[in-house]
Amino acid sequence: MSAGAASTSVTWIERARRVTPGGVHSPVRAFAAVGTEPLAIVDAHGADVRDATGRSFIDYIGAWGPALLGHAHPAIEAAVVAAARRGLLFGLASAPEVDLAERIVSRVPGCQMVRFTVTGTEATMSAVRVARAATGRRLLVKFAGGYHGHADMFLVSAGSGAATLGVPDSPGVTPAIAGDTAVARFNDLDDVDRILAASAGQMAAVIVEPVVGNMGCVPPDPGFLEGLRERCTRAGIVLIFDEVMSGFRVARGGAAARYGVTPDLITLGKVAGGGMPLAAFGGHRELMQRVAPAGPVYQAGTYAAHPLSVAAGLAMLDAIDQQPDLYDRLERAGARLQEGLQAAAGAAGVPVSVQRVGSMWTVFFSSHPVRSWDDAAGVDRDAHARFFRGMLARGVLLPPSAFESAFLSASHDDGAIDRTVAAAREAFLEARR
């Protein structure tokens, strides 16, 4: 990087920090966990991004998941431009939103009705509200390491010892709100049983990322999702799959389709909006009919079902449907990358666990697989930061956190994967120092 480019980059982040907390509008963008300054991206096409200094990178952040087909897919861009020419915002209903709702209902198991929101946080918050209204109960189970947005009820960590209910995980979250959320261990049905037994029949919902992406990519153990389904059915608890990340990412019908387990409510986002701000919650008709104006559970938003986002979502689903082998190709590409990274780490003598579900993947600097937050919390974060910096120096952009899933896209061809593995051979050597 030239001195002039470096000066431009520093000026950007210095200016940003004067007017924005930390200089960024979402914490992970600060690159604080990897010991380097954040990037300012100015261009993204296919599998590549370019920053303000002119450097290009093979990108595995993928806008944190939406870029299933790669950045700036021509059909999605064209659909958004065409929609913009018809008007940016109506504030009333429009026919295309019905088309998108029908498309989602037709492919997501258990999703008989759907309501669009703007963000995943809105979707998960609303799904929990529906579950509480339907059951007349107040308590919620989430899993340590899972992320469901920044609503107060989700910013809860596990209590100490055998405590059943949670404690606030952020200033500004009151103990009373945190006390309505219990925190279980992912992939541990015995821990779920402990919490349900202590809840005295007051558990309204269990919310889970069926494929965890927010402590890195952690797949469900065989039988875990089925066990949650059986327990929720038996106790009259609403099972919510948070598929904001995995929906349309790990399979055509998301994780519910991939694993053959149907939740009562489901939340979607990222891929569903084709890169535009769109999320949704949906589920069984008798639950969704409780949402206003059909029922008494209030939820609203001026920007919900925004016409540009709906156009992008329809174009995304069209493009997926036009590639019947898409998910098979992503599986093959993911396996090629996973095997290459594991071999590169082995050659460098670095213990890692490369975990993957479809096109979601993570390199954990751990000598054993990561099955829950207890495992994830023990990974070598310093080694990950050195690996990140080594990959960045070689033109490969990974998530700037040891606890975020990376993403393949349909634009990552064999050449991009081979270049990534070649970079990793050197970066793993740097990671062990």
Image (cartoon, rainbow, N blue to C red):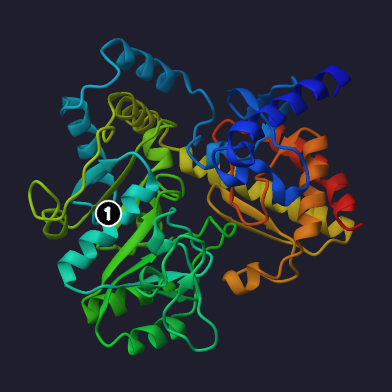
Question: In the image, is 129 to the left or to the right of 14?
Answer: left
- Count of marks, rendered view: 1
Displayed quadrant of residue 102: top left
Return the residue found at the far top: 85
**In the rendered image, is residue 55 in sight?**
no
Query: For the point 57% across and 71% down, which residue is it?
Result: 372
Looking at this view, is 44 or 69 the one in front? Answer: 44
Would you place residue 287 above or below residue 202 in this image? Answer: above
Which percent across, then down, holds residue 141? 37, 72
Q: Amino acid at mark 1?
A: Ser
Displayed quadrant of residue 217: bottom right
Q: According to the image, label 1 marks what residue?
A: 126
Query: For the point 34% across and 31% down, which residue is it?
Result: 313
Which percent across, then down, holds residue 140? 33, 71
Query: For the point 75% across and 70% down, which residue is it?
Result: 367
How packed mark 1 is, by other alpha carbons closer than 10 Å (few <14, some 14-19, many 20 or more), is many
User: Which quadrant of the rendered structure holds the N terminus?
Assistant: top right
User: Which quadrant of the rendered structure holds the C terminus?
Assistant: bottom right
**In the rendered image, is residue 36 in sight?**
yes
Query: For the point 51% across and 66% down, which residue is it?
Result: 169
Question: In the image, is 238 to the left or to the right of 375?
Answer: left
